[in-house]
Image: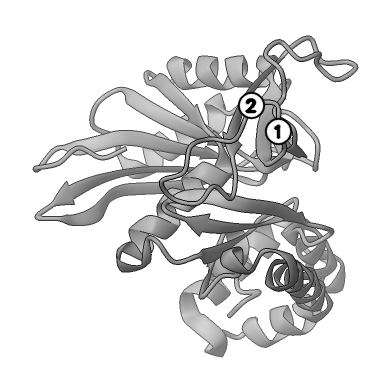
Amino acid sequence: MLRFGNKSGWIGIDAGASTLKVVQASSRHGAVRLDRVAVAPRSAALEAGASLTGGGVSHELATAVAIAGGFDGRSAAAVLSMSACDLSAGRRQPVGAAAPAGVAAICSDDWLADRPSGQADRPSSGDGWYTLSTAEDTADELCRDILTCGFSCRAIDGMPQALARAVTMSEPAASCAPIGFVDWGHTGALYGTVVDGAPAYVRRLRDCGLARLEQELADELSLDRAKVEEMMAAAASCGPDAPSASLIREVAGPLIERLGAELEKTLAHLRMHRKGLAPKKILLFGGGAWGGAAA
């Protein structure tokens, strides 16, 4: 969230599965500027379906704050990794819906997808709703960890909504046209179509997480995870001419093919059944966008 003028906005915290990202931006003369950015590796990468419970992010957040040299203000907004969330589509979930087995309680948000601009919401009992949920303990722990580091968590956002806003900020002139995003992360990949600044269609792309690539590189080179991440970051910074870039592309080949096949399956479905949501452009986010695999 931004403030206008010369004031910095809230602190944004992305509690990812393998890294914790912290940023603070400001809007000056109509342009958004990143004032502070810090990335800290998670002490133990989350697996798909895991929650933050038992791990927490307080240590990583403190590390990120030290890297950035501090942040202005205390207000923060956070977003959780999709590995800690459940995404379902269909009918709207009733208030107070039962939590999954083994989970004490859940907190969730839902939104109506694929609604033509200007039309009223469909009946609350009808199809066409997405529900994003996480364990209440996970949300509570994230807020506590943020408070421990001296910040106040004012909101926890859903990844689809956060990515939709990022797409809209990147393509402000095309806000009404469908634009796609792929968030290529550690535990998986998420596709979405954004229309009028909101996620109108969302789908997980199966078995496409970067964790598989990192493990294959570690096995190939007999390196630990930290060294592999350093190598991928160096390749991303130096571009396709980096010494390790060709090796990363070679090892990543099957995973990229898998991602491409899942993406093409999704786009074919949209072109066949929901033409209005077939994107004119697709933006790439996540570790795969800068980690050397897509270099």
On the image, numbered disc 1 is attached to which residue? 126
Secondary structure under badge 1? loop
Question: Is 210 rendered above or below residue 57?
Answer: below
- Left/right of residue 60 with respect to residue 201 in the rendered view: left
Residue shown at the point (25%, 37%) measured from the top left: 9
- Mark number for residue 186? none
Q: Nearer the viewer, residue 88 or 136?
A: 88
Question: Is 13 rendered above or below residue 229?
Answer: above
Question: Is 163 rendered above or below residue 280?
Answer: above
- Left/right of residue 281 with respect to residue 229 in the rendered view: left
Relative image position of residue 173 (x, y in whole percent): 30, 67
Which quadrant of the rendered structure holds the N terminus?
top left
Q: Amino acid at mark 1?
A: Gly
Q: Dot 1: few (<14), some (14–19), or many (≥20) neighbours within 10 Å?
A: few
Q: Amino acid at mark 2?
A: Ser
On the image, numbered disc 2 is attached to which residue? 124
Q: Quadrant of residue 294?
A: bottom right
* Disc 1 and disc 2 in contact, CB within 8 angstroms: yes
Residue shown at the point (64%, 24%) measured from the top left: 108
